[in-house]
Image: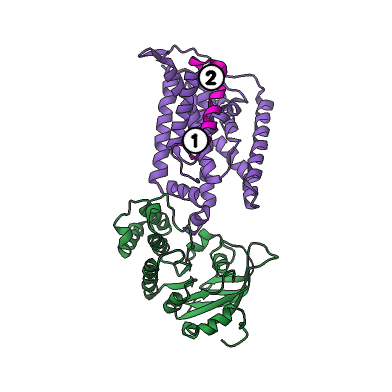
Amino acid sequence: MNPQALIDGLIAGSTIGLGAIGLTLAYSILRFANFTHGDFLAWGAYLTLTLFGLLGGLSAGLGAPVHPFSFGWGLPLAMLGGAALTVLLALGLDRILFGRLRARGADVIIIVMASFGASMALRSLLEFIFTAKPVYFTNALQIAQPLGLGMRATPDQLLVIGLTAVLVAGLHLLLTRSATGRAMRAVSENPDLAGVYGINVAQVIRMTWIIGAGLACVAGVMAGLLVQIRPYMGFDLLLPLFAATILGGIGSIPGAMLGGLIIGLAEAFAVQIIGAEWRAAVSFIILVLVLMLRPQGLFGQRGA
Amino acid sequence: MIALSVNNLRAGYDPDLAIVKGVSFDVNKGEALCILGPNGAGKSTLIKAMAGLVPSFGGTVRLGPRDVTGLTPHLLVRSGLGFVPQTDNIFTRLTIRENLQIASQLVARSERQRRIDAMLAMFPDLGERPGELAGALSGGQRQMLAAARALLTEPDVLILDEPSAGLSPKLVGQVFDTLRRISEAGVTLVLVEQNVRAALALTPRALVLVDGHLAHDGPSNALHDGALLGELFLGRRGAEQPA
């Protein structure tokens, strides 16, 4: 077996894991499966691409690649702006749609269906604005460098893995060591009791959208940087994202990340063993197996 | 001085089917009272409405001079009302210390650690293992943590919903000892309780709620006579009749 699958799996798993973290937060705190999360990835990538283009137009230096990467300083700057805009998109959607349904005491299935509809609308709008033609952050070619043991990776790919590790570690610290994190974990366990403890639940919900949408943007940019940007890129990632979320255990940040890595690795090895045409089936098979054998996932709690 | 004033409160889950049907009473600062009544009388709904967890359709709730009717639970807590639900009253996936840390966010930063330490000292069972998950605590210890959490903010009024529910007789004794200490410390206490004897022994004043109406408001020792309590529970005596 080609050991390159290990690196390929880690890279794909990084994007999936980062996306799954936002999904698992929304699932545990907002208590519904948010189908728009995949579209936040795609919107994040397109918004970042637009800002990257604007920054490149303002200053050629910001667009010029910085060795050894395929992009210049403009991309991380644009990603910050893209993340802020994606957060605004998520907060706006919550205000005009999900928040109103919550206030009316709508059933979960109604909110899930609403998110499904909103997802289609967001995707169509993206296609309308940017067309379905794939676009790229950069046209620069990168040569994969040998890492040893027969594995190779480009600097961009290694950066993606490193950035993911930093973000996951930071988020884990936020949730376990800060007052904000404790409040989020409390709301996740019992929102009514959280209010009785003096926690502003509405504020925690806003923070959940901010973190989830921000990370979705980063995951979208990663996917766009390593593959391509398409309106359907988030939709195509939805199944792996849900599989990673459920595999890791609803509400568990380390679980979502580990779930993402497992899904990414399983897909990469499946490509080598049974062929690329079965790649998409891997997430589905893992999802079904987890739901049948360990519905609480790796780190989740029964009944969560 | 009145700490809590409930005036003609109507509350429930459906405006057409109010469970609490126009209840009024005042609680003086430092006073302890219990609310008794048969199952389904609306006791828990009444205090949940006071705590902002059940919608009210009419009437007012005042904390001191401030009208707090309709405020969300987190704003009520910030206004000085502590509420301990009957069940699911602690975060089991957080440690004992984290449960207290969350509550401590409502007090000045410089005060937080002192108050947490004070609560851990007040409840030695908790103080011995602050890093343990709250889900590992026994029923009585959970009630203690719930009370400690509520007391940490030094509320003007502490409301508890059946703190002895589901506990063994030994643990019930522990919980009521704790409540006695809290009351003796001058905290205004409102208690809904099914354990009538223990509640009447703890609080000098008792309300009896029957079918959403206040059927009795008077000294607890007037209810030590089981016959009167039985008549009130069965609805044979109403608020308009002298208890």
The disc label shown at residue B178, or none? none
Find the distance from the CA under tag 2 to the CA under tag 1.
34 Å
Judge by depth and name the residue closer to the eye, B86 or A30. Answer: B86
Q: Residue at x 45, y 81 (%)?
A: B204
The numbered mark 2 sits on a residue in which chain?
A: A
Whether residue B22 is visible here, answered yes or no, is yes
- Magenta residue span: A271-297
Colour in which the image shows chain A:
purple
The quarter of the picture where residue B5 lies is bottom right
Determine which residue is flagged by label 1.
Answer: A293
Colour in which the image shows chain B:
green
The disc label shown at residue A227, or none? 2
Question: Which is nearer the N-term, disc 2 or disc 1?
Answer: 2
Q: Is residue B40 left or right of residue B220?
A: right
Other residues around mark 1 within 10 Å, as few (<14) / some (14–19) / many (≥20):
few
Toward the bottom, the furthest residue is: B242
Above or below residue B121? Residue A228 is: above
Other residues around mark 2 within 10 Å, as few (<14) / some (14–19) / many (≥20):
some
Q: Give the main secondary structure of the magenta stretch.
A: helix
Q: Amino acid at mark 1?
A: Leu
Q: Position of residue A284 (x, y in %)?
A: 56, 28
Q: Residue at x 44, y 53 (%)?
A: B91
Looking at the rendered structure, whether the residues under marks 2 and 1 are on a common chain is answered as yes
Mark in the foreground, 2 or 1: 1
Instruction: Look at the image and say whether residue A71 sits in the magenta stretch.
Output: no
Q: How is the image coloured?
A: by chain
